[in-house]
């Protein structure tokens, strides 16, 4: 069974938001885009808005889909939809993550990202 997951690509000038997973979770301390699982009955956009509120205490405005990937981890298969999203107001706070950083494209290779994000990061580098 595949788990539907959404995430947000949020830019601030030449930097985008990267979030470090909590140490106690699967793939702990790896970096990722903010987001999470789509709950039954939710649209992908609604799930993204909810997850960003829960994890960052901000309300994002999802736009178009940047990319979709399916990745098989040893413990689960995820279908990840990454949305371009705006952050109209508020400053993200790490309510669930270990750390948050606004990083440049050049800094991508310096952080260990989740395997599911690798294909996305390659496309971001091509921008």
Image (spheres, rainbow, N blue to C red):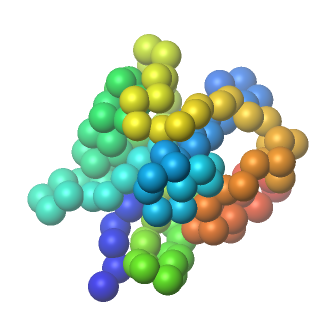
Residue with the most extreme right position = 106
Residue with the most extreme top position = 90
Could you tell me residue 101's position as x and y percent?
65, 31
The quarter of the picture where residue 102 lies is: top right
Residue 4 in sight here: yes
Name the residue nearer the viewer: 80 or 61. 80
Q: Is residue 81 above or below residue 105?
A: below
Residue with the most extreme front position = 24
Q: Is residue 56 above or below residue 127?
A: above
Could you tell me residue 81's position as x and y percent?
45, 60
In percent of the image, x 37 and y 53: which residue is there?
Answer: 36
In percent of the image, x 42 and y 48: which residue is there?
Answer: 35
The answer to whether 39 appears left or right of 62 in the picture is left
Could you tell me residue 126's position as x and y percent?
82, 55
Could you tell me residue 114's position as x and y percent?
61, 61
In percent of the image, x 25 and y 45: which residue is there?
Answer: 46
């Amino acid at each position: 069974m595949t788990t539907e997951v959404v995430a947000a690509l949020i830019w601030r000038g030449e930097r985008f938001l990267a979030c470090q997973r909590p140490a106690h979770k699967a793939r702990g301390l790896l970096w990722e885009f903010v987001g999470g699982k789509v709950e039954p009955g939710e649209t992908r956009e609604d799930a993204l808005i909810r997850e960003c509120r829960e994890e960052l205490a901000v309300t994002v405005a999802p736009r178009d889909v940047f990319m979709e990937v399916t990745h098989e981890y040893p413990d689960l298969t995820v279908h990840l939809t990454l949305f371009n999203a705006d952050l109209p107001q508020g400053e993200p706070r790490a309510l669930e993550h270990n750390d948050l950083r606004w990083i440049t494209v050049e800094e991508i290779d310096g952080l260990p990202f989740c395997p599911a994000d690798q294909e996305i990061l390659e496309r971001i580098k091509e921008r």
